[in-house]
Amino acid sequence: MAEEKKKKKFSFKILQDLCMDCATCWHECQYEGGSGAIGVVYNGVSSFEIDDGTCIACGRCFRACPVNAIERTKNA
């Protein structure tokens, strides 16, 4: 029997229109015990995005964002 992946209680998304590209979320995710799920995406301009597949839903980025640009959504 295949091992079932544990369901996350919350999902997180960076709201690009509010994000000021300070990299606080990235730093928390990379170096403070997070999963390294936040990366920089270049689409003409750089922006930060959360990889849902890598994210462990620890909420460090959500709590660290100084401008509340990370949305937390409760999963069903």
Image (tube, rainbow, N blue to C red):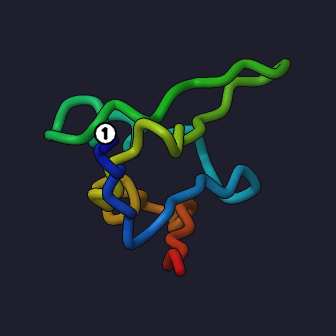
24 vs 31, nearest the viewer? 31
Q: How many marks?
A: 1
Of the 4 image quadrants, the one containing the N terminus is: top left
Q: Residue furthest front?
A: 1
x then y, percent, for residue 10: 43, 69
The amino acid type, in three-letter code, at marker 1 is Cys
The residue wearing badge 1 is 29
| Image coordinates for residue 61, horizontal then vertical, percent | 37, 53
Kindly indicate the quadrant of the structure image that contains residue 60.
bottom left
10 or 45, nearer to the observer: 10
Q: Horizontal placement of 8 versus 49: left or right?
A: left
Query: Which residue is pictured at 50% across the width and 71% down the height?
Result: 72
Q: Residue at x 38, y 64 (%)?
A: 8
Near mark 1 (Cα within 10 A), the count class, few <14, some 14-19 or many ≥20, is many
Vertical placement of 43 versus 64: above or below? above
Left/right placement of residue 54 relative to residue 13 reads: left
Residue in the image at 42% along x and 60% along y: 66
* Residue farthest toward the left in the current orientation of the protein: 33
Q: Quadrant of residue 33?
A: top left
Q: Position of residue 63 (x, y in %)?
A: 32, 65
Image coordinates of residue 14 in percent, x first then y, are: 60, 53
Point 53% across, 81% down: residue: 76
Which structural element holds mark 1?
A: helix
**From what the image shows, is residue 23 above or below residue 9?**
above
